Image (tube, helix red, strand yellow):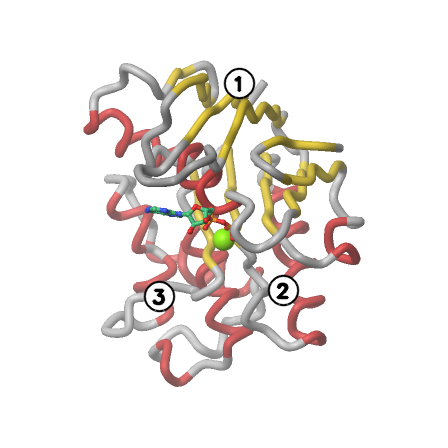
């Protein structure tokens, strides 16, 4: 199993009920899983926990055989940089870096050797080959999200976590960006966990889990 989350519990201080009350899920390499649920149901919290960005109260997360609990902060950061690609609703590109530099940013942070043609090859796969020297503010939302997808995939992560990646895009752009995300993660044989509000998009993944009142339902 690439990712195993086992009976995760999480309560933020001051909250009456836990956000996550025994949530379990598993994901294999090459598999796609959609996570749905109302706003505030804990989807982002679960993704952050899996990415090692948020603590949890009980349960266990194992990524490629490595348990997050007990791992030193530095090791967790290393795992996140090398094994996990994250894609956010807000794109989160670095405004002062051009497309080529944004594409290679995470791979460089992870300490990987980035060949000069790496950005070009990724840009071509994403239909961005004419935009390599542009800055994020010169791009449309859909183009920015393509760059963010490329940045996440370039280090060849085993696991891709996408938190409402099409939430800021119009319908036509949503379809194009979603298909591209599915295609590129499949090519890399990565596991993809994607949060979406759209049943239509969720239907294109292998499985859907619904988060409600701190629990998952199929
Ligand atoms: N850092 C935090 N501190 C306190 N409460 C939080 C924090 N992050 C999220 N929450 C609360 O946890 C619940 C779940 O949030 P979130 O995981 O963002 O839901 P979703 O992504 O499904 O919309 C919400 O009630 C939210 O207000
Ligand atoms: Mg959220």
Q: Is residue 185 left or right of residue 198?
A: left
Label 2 sits on residue: 177
Residue 35: image quadrant is top right
Q: Residues within 10 Å of mark 3 (few under 14, many from 20)?
A: many
Residue 74: image quadrant is top left
**Looking at the image, residue 185 lies above or below residue 173:** above
Q: Position of residue 111 (x, y in %)?
A: 24, 40
Q: Nearer the viewer, residue 193 or 56?
A: 56
Ligand 2 within 8 Å of disc 2? The answer is no
Label 2 residue SS: helix
Gap between marks 2 and 1, in whole Å? 31 Å
Q: Earlier in the sequence, mark 2 or mark 1?
A: 1
Residue drawn where x is 44% and y is 48% of the image = 86
The answer to the question of whether label 2 and label 3 lie on touching residues, with beta carbons closer than 8 A, is no
Label 3 sits on residue: 93
Ligand 1 within 8 Å of disc 1? The answer is no
Residue drawn where x is 43% and y is 64% of the image = 91
Q: Position of residue 177 (x, y in %)?
A: 63, 64
Q: Residues within 10 Å of mark 2 (few under 14, many from 20)?
A: many
Label 3 residue SS: loop
**Looking at the image, residue 214 lies above or below residue 65:** below
Q: Which quadrant: the N terminus? A: top right
Label 1 residue SS: strand
Q: Position of residue 20 (x, y in %)?
A: 50, 32
Q: Position of residue 119 (x, y in %)?
A: 40, 59
Label 1 sits on residue: 6
The mark closer to the camera, 3 or 1, is: 1
């Amino acid at each position: 199993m690439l990712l195993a989350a086992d009976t995760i519990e999480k309560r933020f201080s001051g909250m009456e009920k836990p956000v996550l009350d025994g949530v379990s899920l598993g994901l294999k390499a090459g598999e796609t899983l959609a996570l749905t649920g109302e706003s505030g149901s804990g989807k982002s919290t679960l993704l952050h926990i899996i990415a090692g960005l948020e603590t949890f109260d009980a349960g266990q997360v194992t990524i490629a055989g490595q348990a997050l609990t007990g791992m030193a902060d530095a090791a967790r950061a290393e795992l996140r940089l090398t094994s996990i690609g994250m894609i956010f609703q807000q794109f989160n590109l670095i405004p002062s870096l051009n497309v080529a530099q944004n594409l290679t940013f995470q791979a460089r942070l992870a300490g990987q050797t980035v060949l000069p043609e790496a950005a070009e090859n990724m840009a071509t796969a994403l239909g961005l080959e004419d935009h390599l020297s542009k800055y994020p503010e010169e791009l449309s939302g859909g183009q920015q999200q393509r760059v963010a997808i490329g940045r996440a995939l370039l280090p060849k992560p085993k696991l891709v976590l996408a938190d409402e990646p099409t939430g800021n895009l119009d319908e036509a752009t949503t379809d194009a960006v979603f298909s591209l995300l599915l295609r590129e993660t499949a090519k890399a044989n990565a596991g993809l966990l994607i949060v979406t509000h759209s049943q239509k998009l969720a239907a294109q993944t292998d499985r859907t889990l619904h988060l409600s009142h701190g629990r998952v339902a199929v």
